[in-house]
Amino acid sequence: MKKSWWKVLTVIILVYVVAGGLLFDVPRLHLLNETIRALYFHVPMWFGMIILLTASAVFSIRYLQTGQNEFDTRAIEFANVGIAFGAFGILTGMLWAQFTWGQWWSGDPKQNASAIALLIYFAYFVLRGSLEDADQRARISAVYNIFAFAALIPLLFILPRLTDSLHPGNGGNPGFNAYDLDSRLRMTFYPAVVGWTLLGIWITSVRIRIRRLFLNQEI
Amino acid sequence: MSYLFNVKQLLSFVVKEIRLEWRSRYAINGIVLYLISTIFICYLSFNVRSDALNPVIWNVLFWIIILFSLVNAVAKSFIQETEGSFLYLYWTHSPQTLIVGRTIYNGLLMLILGSVGFVIYSLVLGNPVQDLLIFFLVIVLGTLGLSFTMTMVSAIASKARNSNTLMAILSFPIVLPMLLMIIKISKNAISGVERAASLDDFLVLGAINALVGAASYLLFPYLWRS
């Protein structure tokens, strides 16, 4: 039980976030109305994705330093779950956009950038699939993972600031203070980020254990 | 493994690559012909008089043609390495020399290719560019940046099966941010926007180039050892 306190915490936070996110009072803003609640579900997906992908890149670096398979297993699973978060981020974003912008996909720079980000990581999975030798697969995909992460940074953080976008917080600065987050929103938003990220780490740790079992079985 | 490399060795490596290329002229001829035929196909398919193409389409088409020629040209740099030359390079050169040398060589090749492509392209499809200096600068920075990325990706793809498909899959999404910046600046150059307006974009393009260049310099030794 000692080690699982954070899992209990995750469940408590997420119950609070889902209940609070749907029930608490939110500010009425023109056009946004109730869709402002997407802040508790859509935005934390992106935070979670970036944190998980960063962890994946860090484990790839650790793999190149040490050559231990354990780090490779962690890198691939963090990337897997990170991309799942990214896919949910795009889906929730599209749902939100459908109500506020009137279209599921309107070619907004942010939508395009996130689609490209997913493409980069799909290429990473294809690369893993096409390498047969286990050692070689681990090393080469670690190199590509780090390279891809370096290419992702300008995509997600620099380019959106240079173009105009309809996305909240744009027109110069895509910070998440766009809603002028009042304290009512903050009370659910910050726990939401923590809760969803913890959930991602939890799923990842389970997947890592499953993969470890498969690896042991092969040997 | 030392991160230093010998400048002399690097220079001699680049000169050796150029000499090898010049002796056979197989790759450069092939790739120039590839470029010319692609341009010609586009020209005949659009079937328009010179200068009649919309500047936006003109711009995007030019860069797409350059991108595809680049993928084909750079793909040969590591993928077509034979076992023997691979072992020779492995024993005689440090990986840093190799990646920097290959990148410089590919950069030069692409620079020539880009310029030749631009001349032929504007010959048959007209030339709406108002600020030629800026456009040429974009060609220089753009082809250099693209070949930085492509050289590294071709080294990665060369280790896998079906490496030619993999080359395109791996490089296109990574290259996209760079390509978007390039197209943006060259659009400015075509419509003759004030030069100061492009300065920021140039800085971003340079920063992306530096980032990708640094990443491939640091990562290549790990790839090479396998």
Image (cartoon, rainbow, N blue to C red):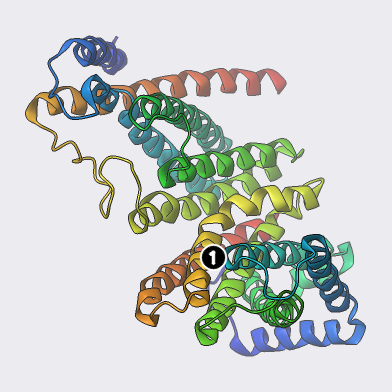
Residue at the image point whose x is 33% and y is 35% from the top = A47
Q: Check the picture and name the quadrant holding the N terminus of chain A.
A: top left
Q: Secondary structure at mark 1?
A: helix
Closer to the camera, B212 or B184? B184
Q: Check the picture and name the quadrant holding the C terminus of chain A.
A: top right
Q: Is residue A142 left or right of residue A96?
A: right
Q: Is residue A90 left or right of residue A37?
A: right
Q: Position of residue B100 (x, y in %)?
A: 62, 75
Q: How many neighbours does mark 1 have within 10 angstroms: few (below 14), some (14-19), or many (20 or more)?
A: some
* Residue B75 position by quadrant: bottom right
Closer to the camera, B51 or B101? B51
Residue at the image point whose x is 39% and y is 81% from the top = B195
Instruction: Say what amino acid the circle numbered 1 marks.
Output: Ile
The vertical placement of B62 against A104, above or below, is below
Closer to the camera, B187 or B1? B187
Closer to the camera, B158 or B63? B63
Name the residue carrying label 1: B183
* Residue A102 position by quadrant: top left
Q: Pick out the residue farthest to the left.
A: A183
Q: Is residue A131 left or right of residue A47?
A: right
* Residue B34 position by quadrant: bottom right
Tell me which chain the residue with mark 1 is part of. Answer: B
